[in-house]
Amino acid sequence: METLDLGRRIDLLSMDPHFHDISIAVYRDDDGGGATYLLHSYSRRDGAGDRLRFLAGVMRTAGGMVAGGGSPLAVRFACGHAHEAALKRLFVESCKAPPGTDPERRPLSVLDKKNDLTVRVDALGGGRYRCGGDRDGARERRRVAAIAAGLGKLAELQVDGTEVRFPCGADHHELISLLLIRALNVRGALREQEAAAARGMLSAPSQQR
Ligand SMILES: [Zn+2]
């Protein structure tokens, strides 16, 4: 029986659609000072390690993370903060990447089709960002504030009107651009996360191959 001290499991993809439906978990370990996250699979299938290394790379690029040290499957935020809610979203989004693809770099703006509104995020420095629309009516301002609130919810940010702020005081452009598109439909994003978590509960790692 293999026993590993991986830390605390914070999320699980129970079936990776891009690699033989293997399960992939992400663990959090706070021992080295800041929070470090480790990708792990109990699958012994050939290539599973390559898939995990690829996903760690996607998380570094798409989430602006750095290598966690000690393992090619470990990643962390350079600021040392855990940003656990944002990390979970980043994990879910990263696992959608098919092998061999480069994660696309998203701009700091998004088109809100339903409202025909382009929402732009300006970096103010020190981990602060201001959301704004390309139109500025009362309705558009409400929508922009709702999107800022959505960003706040998805990444545990402090929200003040149309401004959001990372609690670490460091910039995270990649996270903002990744989460911006999800902030258009926060309820959908949270539902997706809860469904994945529920599936994870049903399948204990020891029963997986
Ligand atoms: Zn940070």
Image (cartoon, rainbow, N blue to C red):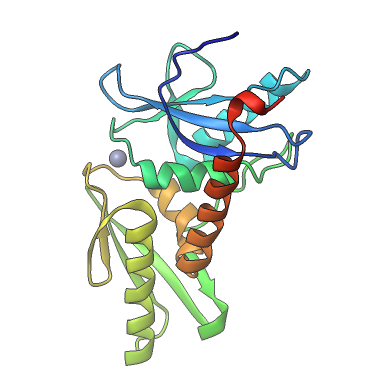
Q: Residue at x 39, y 49 (%)?
A: 173
63 relative position to 169: left or right: right
**Quick one: quadrant of the C terminus?**
top right
130 relative position to 143: left or right: left
Figure disc tally:
0
91 relative position to 76: left or right: right
Visible in this render: residue 53?
no
Q: Residue at x 73, y 41 (%)?
A: 98
Visible in this render: residue 38?
yes
**9 shown above or below 182:** above
**Quick one: quadrant of the N terminus?**
top right
Question: Where is residue 134 shown, x and y percent of the image?
Answer: 42, 80
Q: Residue at x 44, y 38 (%)?
A: 64
Given the current orientation, which residue lies at the most extreme bottom position?
Answer: 138
Q: Residue at x 50, y 12 (%)?
A: 4
* Ligand 1 positioned in quadrant: top left
Residue 206's quadrant in the figure?
A: top right
Q: Nearer the viewer, residue 88 or 58?
A: 88
Question: Where is residue 163 shown, x and y percent of the image?
Answer: 25, 65
Q: Nearer the viewer, residue 105 or 155?
A: 155
Question: Where is residue 169 shown, x and y percent of the image?
Answer: 21, 44
**98 shown above or below 75:** below
**171 shown above or below 179:** above
**21 shown above or below 141:** above
